[in-house]
């Protein structure tokens, strides 16, 4: 019997279909509040499982869990919000809301570094830029830039952003979803504002990802129960998944199929066929 993922890969579901592939629970490949997601070049999904206090690495073809990252060395329970992976060095960078830090580990759950406490961060989204810097959405009202060693390099000015959540970065720009101002800020790599995207179309933007040509972005609109597609100049293109998503958190585009969006929700993972 084919899995839902295999059916989508073969083009069986119609455009606009939404399929639930992983549900609620504490067993491997179940989730209790799924948040940030990163898709590796291998196709594996790396997903933050917040209230199970772990990060799971999922095989989407076999529909099983390949790896679980868990940590018990901190004052408070590990509470991962978002994750990015330096695949060249097998390093996982995880924003740990529970302890106000970024945790860096190997694929064997060995803690390599922790940073961000010195700056008092309240971390949300995290991403790795093409030139090797770590960008973090600090819910205290900043976007912060670190090197891979955890050294704080720069931040936005006070008042420049409000409540930053998701982040994605390409060679030119940083895209930051702002739940406070209900928009996506576009910054340059010097953390200067370029434009805002999505005002009037977003009710609670969280995770975001580039489309397959990287000339547009998809944004999880948490309070709007949908995904919103814009081009990089800020023009609204379409709504996706209306009536089929329930408070979507984070989002990623499948590596091997540019017509599948993987969307995390409170207690499940869904595939949005675009």
Image (cartoon, helix red, strand yellow):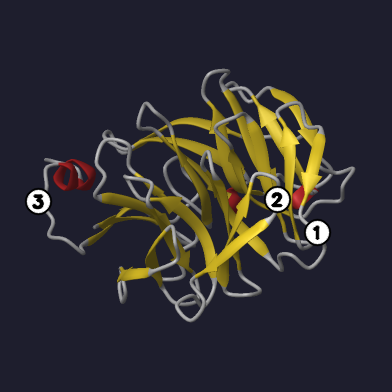
Give the label, 2 or 3, closer to the camera: 2
Mark 2 to mark 3: distance in Å? 43 Å
Give the label, 1 or 3, closer to the camera: 1
Q: Secondary structure at mark 2?
A: loop
Q: Residues within 10 Å of mark 1 (few under 14, many from 20)?
A: few
State the quadrant of the N terminus.
Answer: top left
Which is more N-terminal, label 2 or label 1? 1
Image position of 120 with respect to 1: above or below = below
Mark 1 to mark 3: distance in Å? 48 Å
Q: Is residue 116 left or right of residue 125?
A: right
Instruction: Identify the residue under disc 1.
Output: 157
Tell me which corner region of the image, top left, top right, bottom left or bottom right, holds residue 193. bottom right
Q: Residue at x 24, y 41 (%)?
A: 257
Q: Position of residue 25 (x, y in %)?
A: 47, 53
Q: Residue furthest bottom?
A: 200
Tell me which corner region of the image, top left, top right, bottom left or bottom right, holds residue 236. bottom left
Which is more N-terminal, label 3 or label 1? 3
Whether tag 1 and tag 2 are in contact, CB under 8 A, the answer is: yes
- Specify the label residue 12 is tagged with: 3
Q: Position of residue 148 (x, y in %)?
A: 70, 28
Image position of 199 with respect to 16: above or below = below
Instruction: Identify the residue under disc 2.
Output: 191
Q: Residue at x 76, y 63 (%)?
A: 141
Q: Residue furthest top?
A: 89
Q: Residue at x 57, y 74 (%)?
A: 182
């Amino acid at each position: 019997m084919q899995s839902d993922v295999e059916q989508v890969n073969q083009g069986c579901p119609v455009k606009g279909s939404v399929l639930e592939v992983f549900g609620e629970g504490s067993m491997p490949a179940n989730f209790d509040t799924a948040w940030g997601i990163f898709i590796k070049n291998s196709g594996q999904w790396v997903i933050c499982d917040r209230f199970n206090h772990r990060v799971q690495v999922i095989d989407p073809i076999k529909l099983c869990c390949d790896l679980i990252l868990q940590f018990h060395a901190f004052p408070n329970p590990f509470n991962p919000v978002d994750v990015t992976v330096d695949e060249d060095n097998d390093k996982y960078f995880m924003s740990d809301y529970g302890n106000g830090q970024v945790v860096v580990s190997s694929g064997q759950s060995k803690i390599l570094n922790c940073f961000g406490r010195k700056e008092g961060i309240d971390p949300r989204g995290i991403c790795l830029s093409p030139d090797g810097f770590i960008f973090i959405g600090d819910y205290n009202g900043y976007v912060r830039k670190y090197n891979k060693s955890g050294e704080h390099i720069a931040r936005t000015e006070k008042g420049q952003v409000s409540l930053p959540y998701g982040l994605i970065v390409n060679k030119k720009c940083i895209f930051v979803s702002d739940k406070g101002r209900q928009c996506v800020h576009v910054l340059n790599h010097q953390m200067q504002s370029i434009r805002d995207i999505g005002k009037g179309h977003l009710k609670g933007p969280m995770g975001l990802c580039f489309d397959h040509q990287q000339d547009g972005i998809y944004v999880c609109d948490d309070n709007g129960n949908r995904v919103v597609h814009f081009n990089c100049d800020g023009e609204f293109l379409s709504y996706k998944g209306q009536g089929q998503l329930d408070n979507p958190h984070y989002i990623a585009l499948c590596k091997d199929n540019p017509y599948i969006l993987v969307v995390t929700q409170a207690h499940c993972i869904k595939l949005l066929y675009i």
